[in-house]
Image: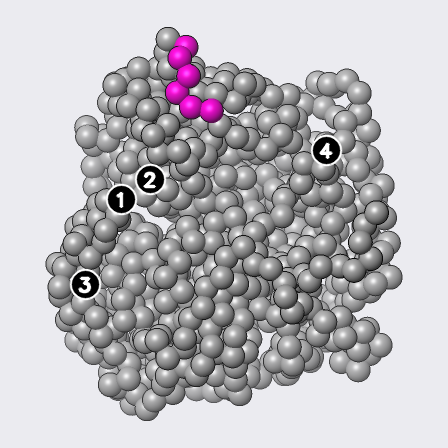
Amino acid sequence: MPSAVKSPQTLYDKVFEDHIVEEKEDGTVLLYIDRHLVHEVTSPQAFEGLRNAGRKVRRPDCTLATVDHTSDTCQNIPTASRKNLTTTEKFIDEADSRTQCMTLEDNVKAFDLTYFGLDDKRQGIVHIIGPEQGFTLPGTTVVCGDSHTSTHGAFGALAFGIGTSEVEHVLATQTLITRRSKNMRVQVNGALAAGVSSKDIILHVIGIIGTAGGTGAVIEFCGSAIRELSMEARMSICNMSIEGGARAGMVAPDQITIDYLKGRPLAPKVDSPEWKKACNYWLGLRSDDGAKYDIEVNIDAKDIAPTVSWGTSPQDVVPITGVVPGPDDFEDEVKKQACERALKYMGLTAGTPMQEVQVDKVFIGSCTNARIEDLRAAARVVEGKKIASNIKRAMIVPGSGLVKRQAEAEGLNKIFSDAGFEWREAGCSMCLGMNPDILSPGERCASTSNRNFEGRQGAGGRTHLMSPVMAAAAAIVGNLADVRKLAPPTHASAKGSPKIELDAHVQDVDGDDELESIMDLPADSQSHPSSTNTAGATAGMPKFETLRGYAAPMDIANIDTDAIIPKQFLKTIKRSGLGSALFHAWRYEAGSNDENPDFVLNKEPWRQSKTLICTGPNFGCGSSREHAPWALLDFGIKCIIAPSFGDIFFNNTFKNGMLPIQITDTAALQRIAAEAKAGKEIEVDLVNQVVRDAEGSELAKFDVEQFRKHCLVNGLDDIGLTMSSVDKIETHEKKRTSVWPWLDGSGYLARHGKGPVKIEAKPVPKTNRGEVIGEPLEW
Ligand SMILES: CC(C)[C@H](C(=O)O)[C@@H](O)C(=O)O
Ligand code: SF4
């Protein structure tokens, strides 16, 4: 008999449990998703999948779309405003970006979704607009085809990035198939010193736990230093949980959360019965005393200094007062090698004081640090000063149209322009450089973004991560600089720091005119033949039983998805044809299409590789781009063996009929790597869960989740399986309406009507190729 007394639960446990539609004995969970954010880069293939299968979007009222990643490619002259915008088609010069944005316009129209387009002042980075609009609420599950969805966890939401196949799954079913994560607690206690902000906290934390420290876990950030932070500062912390390898980051909601949400267009109306009920529920969302965590990290706030990155991984950080480390500073052989490689790439010498490192460009923006508080803090540093003469370019890119307007109302743009910064339109911009704003090879950038991977901001570009005030200081000094020497001691993220004055805009968006602009797309955006011709169906997942072939050996740690497929190849609306772009920066000579003869996939027999074996940990970390497995698959690689994987990449491979195998036993891993290096074939036998050499002798056994194995071996379509559980989804939705009525849509979502769009259950599961596979199966 189940015990009447529930054991103490964590915040994560509570939110997770409130969203379980169905849980299997093997731990597979069908989880209800409350909020789905959609952007132009990771959605075209998902909508195409829906179309091909004749499916609808189940909850348009819980879906919000915008353009952000490629949005400011729209200007010939990057600083030009959108004043002359008539249609997206005419405005965007770059053909692939135009197609991507127009495809989203087509899709939101066809599927009746709320959309903030280029002409909408609420357009902006998806992780900035969700909270800004009150779309993100405490206790919700929030997903987006983007790894930094973790940002929304600052509200006590369970928010995580997903791949495009999962985007399609959520659009069709409003659920995801997942499993429970581990609980991890990071407590930061004490008072932050002057000049130290939430960005320093998270860089410091990642420096301690490493980029794989949170793998498989959801991090709860707590402690007095976190409680003191504003919502915007908490968002910067949760945003970078993914850089610590975690599935998500969370902060328990409190009065600061409630104050932030008051008056937001999509939050329940203040003083309504729903608002009161919601506040009660939200304030109950905290970990119980005695709740157990799988991993605990305790940090004293006074140990955190203004922090900067020196290498090519977000874990490569030092205090600004420190020096560039060298291989001798690391004990572990893998880390020594990674350090050597990073120093070479970054053009740095061990022992150099960080403050002597000269900078070429400065970027203040991104979903980590482009909110109004970030801009205010940076403006305080640069006010009345000029950027240093060696700075070739310094840019401020507000996170949303509303942030931009607010900053302009406060005169911040003038402060920045007077100092020599460019004042830009909202979007991701130089955070990943899907637009012309990139670093040239060898250029060094002080950046408030979240990723310093090789080539992240441009091939050969060198990124140093830091807080907005530190980036502002670097712009003024011309070197990486200690903001404490420049500005009056302050930290922007403290409780009580000025709140974005959204009230004017809130009234605005409630008005009728605004309602029109939410849904009405430019007249000529109805149908674009170029943008509807997305190749490939929803999947086409062949069965995976055994795989025999060459395995390409790689010995690099933390191979991120930016390295697997760089940003310039994300502008496609197809799943196919990415094989030639796989590992582009490593596979070809800089600036040409000539093959690098030393790269493993350019050598025989590994040109024919079907498997990739990586002895370094954390393969596929970083971005959620499903383009990474698509590129591997297109090249011919169906199986990846590594000691550990980035969570989202791991999921994405399964959704494409690929098999990621985790082998933590170093000896076994080395046995396989030795066969691979010798140019011998290996056999991966999924049915028997064993890897063999060419002669059939066992090299290693491996584990695989049984549900996933079942799907791979039978080539099953997840969405079809989930749709056979539609009655359970409906039951959850009824409970949701009665217990959490504010989640069914409020504000302008009312225009969609509340509740699900009727979908047909598919009682008989089929493969992705449409073959009926017998008796109805549960997912
Ligand atoms: C394009 C998108 C898939 C990607 C992500 O998931 O993170 C991007 O936002 C990034 O920062 O690299
Ligand atoms: S990390 Fe950069 S590219 Fe990715 S969503 Fe944030 S701002 Fe955009």
* Residue linked to disc 3: 324
Upstream in the sequence, badge 1 or badge 3?
3
Spatial separation of the CA atoms under disc 2 and disc 3: 23 Å
Upstream in the sequence, badge 2 or badge 3?
3
In the rendered structure, the answer to whether residue 592 lies left or right of residue 31 reads: left
* Residue linked to disc 2: 616
Residue count near mark 3 (Cα–Cα under 10 Å), binned few <14, some 14–19, many ≥20: many
Q: Is the Cβ of the residue at disc 2 closer than 8 Å to that at disc 1?
A: yes
Q: Where, by quadrant of the figure, is residue 446 drawn?
A: bottom left
Spatial separation of the CA atoms under disc 1 and disc 4: 40 Å
Upstream in the sequence, badge 1 or badge 4?
1
**Is residue 625 highlighted in magenta?**
no
Which mark identifies residue 779? Answer: 4
Spatial separation of the CA atoms under disc 2 and disc 4: 33 Å
Spatial separation of the CA atoms under disc 2 and disc 1: 7 Å
Upstream in the sequence, badge 4 or badge 3?
3
Q: Nearer the viewer, mark 1 or mark 4?
A: 1
Which mark identifies residue 334? Answer: 1
The kind of residue tagged 4 is: Trp
Q: In this view, does 301 lie above or below 20?
A: below
Q: Helix or strand or loop: what does disc 2 sit on? A: loop
Position of residue 308 measured from the top left corner of the image (x, y, whole percent): 29, 67
Q: Nearer the viewer, mark 2 or mark 4?
A: 2
Residue count near mark 2 (Cα–Cα under 10 Å), binned few <14, some 14–19, many ≥20: some
Q: Helix or strand or loop: what does disc 4 sit on? A: loop
Position of residue 546 measured from the top left corner of the image (x, y, whole percent): 50, 16
In the rendered structure, the answer to whether residue 751 lies left or right of residue 582 reads: right
